[in-house]
Amino acid sequence: MVEPRSAAALGKEFPYTQKTLCYIEIAADGAVSHGADSGTYERARSGESRLFAVWPGEWASHLFVIDDLDEYARAHGLVHDQERTGLADHEHTTRWELDPSEKKPMGSYITIRVHLDCGCSIRDLDAFAKQIRDQQGWDIATSGGWGGSSTAGTYMRARRKSLTS
Ligand SMILES: [Zn+2]
């Protein structure tokens, strides 16, 4: 018998949100389920279940025990993580402009450049999209390309009509 490896030992190197990761939850009564849902974190934290994950590799796959639930929660955006996302948990001061590459500025989705005058930087588009939807109603396409720098701003796709000035 080989014990599962420790996800905690890998810290932020463990790919908590990698799509090919297979989460396995074992309830206290022995029931096994797979996939993580919105209740997984609470059940694992309360001891109702234990959480494992298979991390598939090219030649072999490895079983890990998810033994750092705080890191799991930060990775999944269940608790806000300023270090990982680059985003403070506050109302951002935003400016946006049409990206110079945008050829169809009247399209339903346009590429914009976002500047955060509050000093935040966007390292996690999903986290930014969630915050800015709540704060300003912007609809950011998280499946689109994005990137940029703190000086030139961050480019991303957004639904034009959702944008406030
Ligand atoms: Zn900010």
Image (cartoon, rainbow, N blue to C red):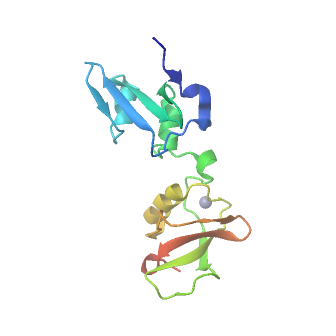
Q: Residue furthest front?
A: 59
The front one of 39 and 50 is 50
Indicate the quadrant of ligand 1 in the picture.
bottom right
Residue 22 position within the rendered picture, expressed as x and y whole percent measured from the top left: 41, 36
Q: Is residue 60 above or below residue 154?
A: above
Residue nearest the viewer, comparing 89 with 104? 104
Decide if residue 68 is on the left or right side of residue 114.
Answer: left
Q: Choose top left, top right, bottom left or bottom right for residue 134.
A: bottom left
Which residue appears at 34% of the width and 41% of the height? 37
* Residue 67 in the image: above or below residue 164: above
Image position, residue 160 (x, y; %): 46, 80
Q: Quadrant of residue 97?
A: bottom right
- Residue at x 49% of width, y 44% of height: 18
Locate residue 93: give its quadrant: bottom right
The location of residue 129, given as percent across then percent down, is 49, 62
Name the residue nearer the viewer: 135 or 70.
Answer: 70
Relative to residue 122, is residue 38 depicted above or below? above
Circle count? 0
